[in-house]
Amino acid sequence: MKYDYDLAVIGGGAAGLTAAGIGANFGARTIMVESDQLGGDCTWYGCVPSKTLLHAAKIAETMKQAKQFGADIGDASLDFSRVMQHIRNVRQKVYQEADHPDHFREMNIDVEFGKASFVDKHTIEITESESRQTISSRYLIIATGSRARVPSIPGLDNVPYLTNETLFELENQPSSLAIIGGGPIGIEMAQAFQRLGTDVTVIDRLPHILDNDNKELAGMLQDRLQREGVDFKLSASVNEVVQENGQIIIQGEREGKSEQWSADKLLVATGRVPNNEQLNLDAAGIDYTKHGITIDDRCRTSVQHIYAAGDVTGRFQFTHMSEHMAKISATNALLKIPLKIDSRHVPWSTYTAPELAHVGATEKSLIEEGTSYEEYRFPYDKIDRAVTDNETEGLIKLFAKKRTGRILGASIFGVHAAELISEYALAMKNGVTLRKMADTIHPYPSYSLGARRAADQWYVKSQSEWLTKLIQKIFRYRGKLPDLDEDRIM
Ligand SMILES: Cc1cc2nc3c(=O)[nH]c(=O)nc-3n(C[C@H](O)[C@H](O)[C@H](O)COP(=O)(O)OP(=O)(O)OC[C@H]3O[C@@H](n4cnc5c(N)ncnc54)[C@H](O)[C@@H]3O)c2cc1C
Ligand SMILES: NC(=O)c1ccc[n+]([C@@H]2O[C@H](COP(=O)([O-])OP(=O)(O)OC[C@H]3O[C@@H](n4cnc5c(N)ncnc54)[C@H](O)[C@@H]3O)[C@@H](O)[C@H]2O)c1
């Protein structure tokens, strides 16, 4: 049978753009269908605006601290509406330079705007206002992303709450902001708004923030945010939300006691739901659950020639993983190369200041799976560059095999953690052990030297009394035995 296209990609976010680009690059006749604007969540409502806002917030914080470096800039602060305009300009710039349809049309990709839904296993209908067209394709990749999950809290529908889609459209700075959800979105936005001068309260049902991260390090970040003024209401349930005299009133409960919190604005950041309802998946026989489209390790759905990548699968909801999964989907579909999702080396970072980053196995998963491992710790206050920069708050935690130094996972809280974590990702992926990292020359005084010194801790812990005594004996050394406390920091 002859199809209109070799590859049809539904959705033009991080996953869709990558998949379509790979398709065209392999010489496949490719179409990409997008219901809104190319770029998806990351460009418009996610990574780009949130990181630009965090950068502005960092400038505000630096201005506050400028006195200690001799600058007398008084009570200077940033103009909120200009910060928001700047965010929208950056977003446009990214869109124009990376996501604009012309770039993809130049690559010979047909870009169509409209909502796609399945007619059968090879055919989709594209609906835009009154117009409808159907196209057929040999292979399809679904990359329709996710949207904010709004919990069913009584009264929530009757108040003007914000989500990540509306937050960056604010014109005026709220004097106070309540955030339901202490995940990455809630925590990044809490620090950004607090630093810009809004009083922030974070409410979460769990007793801690950032549930996927290392508990100790997430606790350090929570302490830092508390010192900056963020108020945390943890282990809290939200029972009702109402609006009174322009204020949002949240009726909650903690430790069995009723509490009430109020704020100018409310941000709901309680996770994501997949965008799959409008796809008419049943018409193609594609399996899905409430978490997303079901896929195997090769990103294949229950239908052999249909793949899914990115947030819509409910797997790892990060831009880099959307791109990775798009690559796996397109390569499996078009080249029949059986690549699998690399779920053992997934890095992520929360872009607060300092950052919190992770790669590989978590301490929690190692304990739960009963894997034997050794922990290596290195504090930021022993990294000279952190000292010169007055950024000594932080800790590198490495999990590795004791004998070989094979790295199982790494968690970092500290400045540039998101950059440092890639060194561990590269090491893990390529079998570079802590010993090899420790033996690799790193420049002084860099933060990456901290990564090397954390790896040095493998040597420190591996050194034993008997070996030291043996060295003394062989070479007839007469000094005192050194302090061989395993937890010493060298
Ligand atoms: C506030 C925030 C901050 C974030 N920060 C980071 C970060 O710092 N780092 C990171 O790695 N990740 C971050 N993320 C997550 C990241 O944005 C997502 O993982 C990523 O955008 C998912 O890409 P995707 O292609 O799967 O989906 P999307 O980017 O959502 O793209 C899906 C596209 O499909 C379109 N679509 C939907 N239905 C249809 C249909 N029926 N027909 C046609 N088109 C359709 C949509 O309009 C959309 O353009 C953040 C998310 C948020 C919300
Ligand atoms: N830097 C990054 O990479 C980055 C930044 C932002 C978002 N993201 C991605 O976006 C996804 C969504 O982020 P998120 O923060 O919305 O979701 P999340 O699922 O990570 O966290 C949601 C939080 O809300 C809490 N919660 C849920 N319902 C609640 C309720 N009714 N009352 C009180 N608390 C409640 C949960 O306990 C949880 O802590 C993340 O999984 C992440 O992959 C990534």
Image: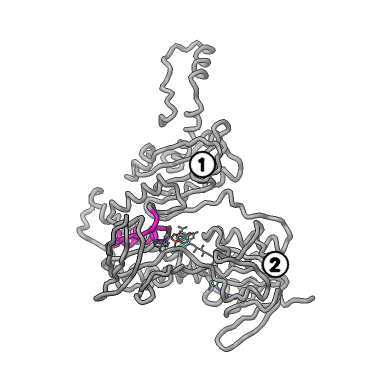
Comparing labels 2 and 1, the label whose residue is closer to the camera: 1
Question: Seen in the image, is 292 located left or right of residue 156?
Answer: right
Q: Is residue 204 magenta?
A: yes
Question: Seen in the image, is 366 located left or right of residue 270?
Answer: right
Q: Quadrant of the N terminus?
A: bottom right
Q: Residues within 10 Å of mark 1 (few under 14, many from 20)?
A: few
* Mark 2 vs mark 1, CA separation in Å: 37 Å
Q: Residue at x 32, y 49 (%)?
A: 223
Q: Which residues are magenta?
A: 181-206
Mark on residue 189?
A: none
Q: Is residue 447 above or below residue 305?
A: above
Q: Residue at x 30, y 66 (%)?
A: 251
365, 361: nearer the viewer: 365
Q: Quadrant of the C terminus?
A: top left
Q: Is residue 73 above or below residue 245?
A: above
Q: Which residue is mark 1?
A: 367
Image coords of residue 5 (percent x, y): 71, 74
Image coords of residue 175 (percent x, y): 26, 67
Query: Does the residue at mark 2 contact the one at mark 1 (Cβ under 8 Å)?
Result: no
Q: Residue at x 37, y 38 (%)?
A: 384
192, 265: nearer the viewer: 265
Image quadrant in which you'd find residue 480: top left
Which residue extends farthest right?
1
Q: Report the image quarter containing ligand 2.
A: bottom left
Mark with earlier residue (2, 1) = 2
